[in-house]
Image (cartoon, helix red, strand yellow):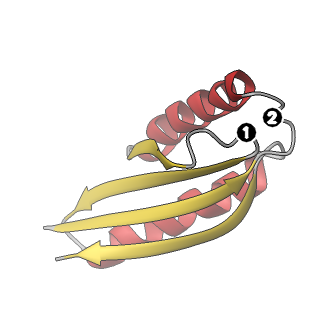
Amino acid sequence: MVIGSCTIELYLPGANSLKGKRKVLRGLLARLHREFNVSAAEVALHDVWKSASIAVVIASTESAHAERTLESVVRWIENNRPDVQVVDHTVELIR
């Protein structure tokens, strides 16, 4: 079994309050779960309006599948969410 983890740093230029930030993140995290069958949550920068750090995690039988899925998540955010900018991301695999 392989557990893949991706931490993604985001910039939310349209968020003008914590309530606005939470609304954007809630929709994004739910969509990632539906599209990729992954777990996703906000893990840092909870009180910063225009920035967020989310973690996306997947359990798989193959390292390549886990890494490919996590990279697809990052590309999907970049291509399908113009209201969110990916600043940085890191992928870790635990075997």
Residue 13 x %, y %? 86, 45
Q: Neighbour class for label 2 at 10 Å: few (<14), some, many (≥20)?
A: some
- Which label sits on residue 49? 1
Closer to the camera in the image, 55 or 65: 55
Please report the residue visible at 44 percent of the width from the left and 73 percent of the height from the top. Answer: 91
In the figure, 92 relative to 44: above or below? below
Which amino acid type is marked by label 1? Trp
Residue 49 x %, y %? 73, 39
Residue beneath label 2, please? 15
Quadrant position of residue 47: top right
Which amino acid type is marked by label 2? Ala
Question: What's the distance in space between the residues labelled 2 and 1, CA to CA?
Answer: 6 Å
Residue 90 x %, y %? 50, 74
Q: Which image quarter holds the C terminus?
A: bottom left
Quadrant position of residue 88: bottom right
Quadrant position of residue 68: bottom left
* Mark nearer the viewer, 2 or 1: 1
Q: Are marks 2 and 1 in contact (CB under 8 Å)?
A: yes
In the figure, 39 relative to 25: above or below? below
